[in-house]
């Protein structure tokens, strides 16, 4: 879908939404479908080829609406209100387009979860590829048990934030399973790449994981927020969070046919995020999404080759997907100054990381619209600023 079609389809969707809300009282407020009604209406897998918008749009009434409870109907008197207004919906459209994540860099979600849980947490040392290996984990586990601590959770990462490194899950998984430690795999960024067969070896050892998470809103063309998580045994999650107040009881809760997601998380409600995924998967198709991932990886490789061709710079970590870690050969202070000048110029925006004690610049291919010319322009800009900086140094 290009910008011209988006304009046309956007107007059509606004008309559909306006018609839906204007006539909502004519719809049955509460659905009468049975759990599992969707299974016969949708395929088991995403399509290989892109489908037309017309086919997707037709399925809104055929597939989606029969199962919807119409919370904005004047005949809805349950729970409490869930607010809705035309100005808010327009702003929501703009929010989706801007895609502002609204965070401060180095969020550290695992560490934050440990703080919330009142738990001690240790970081496992990495090897020279910035990957956690089995022997390093085993050593820390033995040290902890010797001091009376009880390790029970380990978070492995596939595609770390600083350098897109991949922990050695084939070594870590058997240790966690043998020690009865829950192993979670965080693949927030890199997980999207596993739709491409050539990157699936990076998933080796996934069978040892107890849970796995990745963010389609990072690299799979679904706007923020949208995070997907799998658990090996869902009863572990449900057993921890299950609450049954009278006002939330329903006829199908003991049938085994309903996946009641309020038992899977701390919040009670959740947005209809799967609808975004459904639209994207159908309108791009598997091949379109694979092509998008491969294009970004290719652009990162292009930038890597530009860096390697300049003897003043060095690559600081293996370039596996769409991230290039690089720096000027020299001191950390030199690279901090270069980054400050890059960002102060406001032409491109980069953030740093620290690898093996060195201050490193990260170049991540991010935007859907990034092309080779943008990468070339970025490198020319970086190279020019580096030349100016180096000329100022005393000889």
Image (cartoon, rainbow, N blue to C red):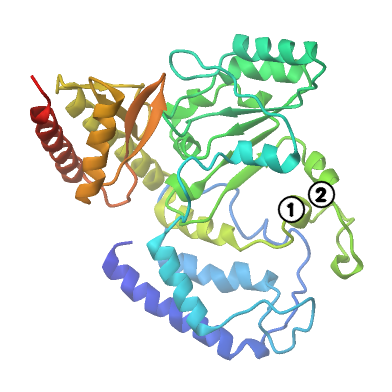
**Residue name at image x 59 percent, y 41 percent:** 109
Q: Nearer the viewer, residue 80 or 16?
A: 80
Label whose residue precedes the other's in the sequence (1 or 2) = 2
The reply, left or right, for residue 350 in relation to residue 45 is: left
Image location (x, y in percent) of residue 322: 35, 35
Image location (x, y in percent) of residue 83: 63, 79
Near mark 1 (Cα within 10 A), the count class, few <14, some 14-19 or many ≥20, is few
Near mark 2 (Cα within 10 A), the count class, few <14, some 14-19 or many ≥20, is some
Image location (x, y in percent) of residue 79: 79, 76
Task: Say if mark 1 contacts mark 2, CB within 8 Å.
Answer: yes
Relative height, residue 315 to residue 289 (above, below): above
* Residue 4 appears in the figure: yes
- The residue indicated by pointer 1 is 266
Task: Give SS at disc 2.
Answer: helix
**Residue name at image x 26 percent, y 26 percent:** 327
If the image is split into quadrants, where does the N terminus sit?
A: bottom left
- The residue indicated by pointer 2 is 241
**Residue name at image x 41 percent, y 49 percent:** 49
> Toward which corner of the image does residue 114 lie, by quadrant?
top right
* Residue 50 appears in the figure: no
Relative height, residue 235 to residue 86 (above, below): above
Relative height, residue 395 to residue 38 (above, below): above
Image location (x, y in percent) of residue 132: 55, 18
């Amino acid at each position: 879908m290009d910008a011209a079609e988006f304009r046309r389809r956007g107007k059509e969707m606004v008309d559909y939404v306006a018609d839906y809300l204007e006539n909502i009282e004519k719809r049955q407020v509460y659905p009468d479908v049975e759990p599992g009604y969707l299974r016969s209406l949708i395929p088991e897998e995403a399509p290989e080829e892109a489908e037309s918008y017309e086919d997707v749009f037709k399925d809104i009434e055929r597939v989606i609406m029969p199962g919807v409870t119409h919370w904005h109907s004047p005949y809805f008197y349950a729970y409490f209100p869930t607010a809705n207004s035309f100005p808010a919906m327009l702003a929501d459209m703009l929010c989706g387009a801007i895609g502002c994540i609204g965070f401060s860099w180095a969020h550290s979600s695992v560490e934050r979860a440990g703080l919330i849980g009142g738990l001690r947490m240790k970081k496992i040392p990495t090897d020279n590829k910035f990957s956690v290996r089995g022997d390093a984990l085993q050593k820390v586990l033995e040290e902890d048990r010797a001091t009376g601590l009880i390790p029970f959770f380990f978070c492995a990462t596939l595609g770390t934030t600083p350098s897109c490194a991949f922990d050695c899950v084939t070594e870590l998984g058997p240790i966690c399973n043998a020690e009865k430690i829950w192993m979670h795999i965080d693949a927030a960024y890199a997980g999207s790449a596993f739709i491409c067969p050539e990157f699936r070896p990076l998933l080796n050892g996934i069978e040892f994981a107890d849970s796995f998470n990745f963010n389609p809103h990072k690299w799979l063309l679904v706007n923020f927020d949208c995070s997907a998580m799998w658990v090996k045994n869902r009863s572990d999650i449900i057993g921890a969070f299950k609450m049954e107040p009278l006002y939330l009881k329903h006829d199908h809760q003991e049938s085994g046919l309903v996946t009641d997601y309020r038992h899977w998380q701390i919040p009670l409600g959740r947005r209809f995020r799967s609808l975004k995924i459904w639209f994207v998967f159908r309108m791009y198709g598997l091949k379109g999404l694979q092509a998008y991932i491969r294009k970004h990886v290719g652009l990162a490789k292009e930038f890597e080759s530009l860096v390697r061709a300049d003897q003043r710079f060095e690559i600081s970590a293996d370039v596996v997907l769409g991230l290039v870690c690089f720096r000027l050969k020299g001191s950390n202070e030199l690279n901090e100054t270069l980054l400050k000048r890059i960002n102060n110029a406001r032409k491109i925006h980069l953030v740093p990381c620290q690898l093996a004690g060195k201050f490193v610049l990260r170049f991540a291919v991010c935007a859907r619209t990034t092309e080779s010319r943008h990468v070339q322009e970025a490198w020319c800009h970086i190279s020019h600023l580096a030349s100016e900086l180096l000329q100022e140094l005393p000889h």
